Image (tube, rainbow, N blue to C red):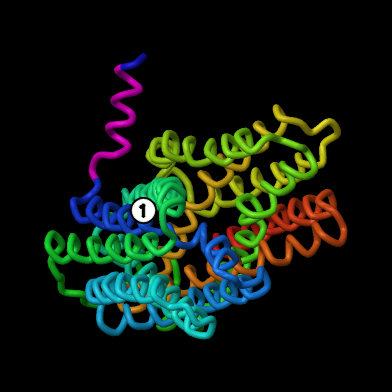
Amino acid sequence: MISTTVKTYRNAYSGLSRSTWLLSLVMLINRSGTMVIPFMTIYLTSTGYSIGQAGVVFGLFGAGAFSGAYFGGRLTDKIGFYPVQLITLTGGGILFMVLGQMHSYSLICLFTFLVSFVNEAFRPANSTAIAFYSKDENRTRSYALNRLAINIGWAVGSGTGGLIADVSYELLFWIDGITNLFAALLMWWFLKPVNYKPAKKSTDGSAPVVHSAYKDKTYLWFITITMLFASCFFQIFTNLPVYFKNDLHFSKPYIGFLMAINGIIIALVEMVLVYKLEGKRRSTVYIIFGVALTGLAFLMLNLPGMGASLAFAMILLITFGEIFSMPFMNTYWISRTLPSNRGQYAGLYTMAWSAAQCLGPLLGAQVAEHAGFNVLWWIVGCLTLFTSFSYWRLHKASA
């Protein structure tokens, strides 16, 4: 039994290219240095700015991320994924260190936008690179490995950042900058530039590919659905902990445990599950199922007698919903691309998540404040099930 389990895990991680592992390591280092973001509001309010002013800064952070994803995708198609990754990692590192030296509110706003713009421009290039270095049969696993790196990096960065912030907030900016520069150096040293030539047919030959992602109506519909789903999904990390604390009166350690369970299960299960499922069915089948699980998980929050055990079950359900849906969303958008337009597709996909990360928590908080959390969970749960139905329509239309 143990030997079979070990073999399954080994097979799940085997067969991926050296470059795919290196790109995931670069992402891990990059995200491990993302220490400023979780503590930005505390930093600003502790230095004399109001919560409202901090909210404006975060709004600019979101705007920078959205526009950075767009230009990063366009630039990737123009000059290739390799230089864009080097430029953004290096530029982001320098900008983080500069931001830490800014004390004027207007300059903090400006450099927050620039930091977010440059950092998010990295993601379409990184996604395009993963597609280039992976094969059709292991592409979903390659993206799952990258997701694993992001999750671990975020956990490490958030945890370490709390300790460093206790010593010095300014030190957070220096460490963020240094990790960016180290990731750039690592990529420059171990991953050499490659010829980036357009192909004449789609990645798997099965999907109709148009020259521009912005003219691909099916893909634009997919992006719209994904943004709606992501807006609901991001409630997990923003409004859900507040609900656990204020309405269910869970202790902070237990809330932390529930949030940690999500990342732990992803780390333990996702690669193996993707290994078992990859290539068995069309990617949209898994997306439909995973998104439906997520919708049911949100609706669970309105069950009578919601307590610690049901909250734990809800987190389990939503985590498996994430595992089934998100890796295969990457598979879907890649299947519609050519190397010559892959940056546009990656940019649009990144933009959808960036927009949702701003709009979802903001709108969710307004609903919770004015109508209560129960109304929020009904809305979010039903909207998520609607997106599952919309993915099903997309699946049937492209059959």
> Which residue shows up at 41% across the image and 82% down it?
71
> Which residue shows up at 35% across the image and 22% down it?
5
Q: Give residue 234's position: percent from left, percent from top.
A: 61, 56
Q: Which residue is mark 1?
A: 32
Q: Give residue 298's position: percent from left, percent from top.
A: 72, 46
> Which residue shows up at 30% across the image and 76% down it?
91
For this view, does 24 lie left or right of residue 206?
left
Vertical placement of residue 382 versus 14, above or below? below
Vertical placement of residue 36 versus 295, above or below? below
Q: Is residue 209 visible?
A: no
Is 4 included in the stretch rendered in magenta? yes
- Write down the quadrant of residue 379 in the picture: bottom right
Q: Quadrant of the N terminus?
A: top left
Q: Give residue 198's position: percent from left, percent from top.
A: 26, 77
Q: Is residue 374 visible?
A: yes
Q: Give residue 111's position: percent from left, percent from top.
A: 44, 80
Extent of the magenta region: 3-15
Q: Quadrant of the C terminus?
A: bottom right
Q: Main secondary structure of the magenta part?
A: helix
The residue type indicated by label 1 comes to Ser
Is 18 included in the stretch rendered in magenta? no
For this view, does 266 lie left or right of residue 249?
left
For this view, does 353 lie left or right of residue 295?
left
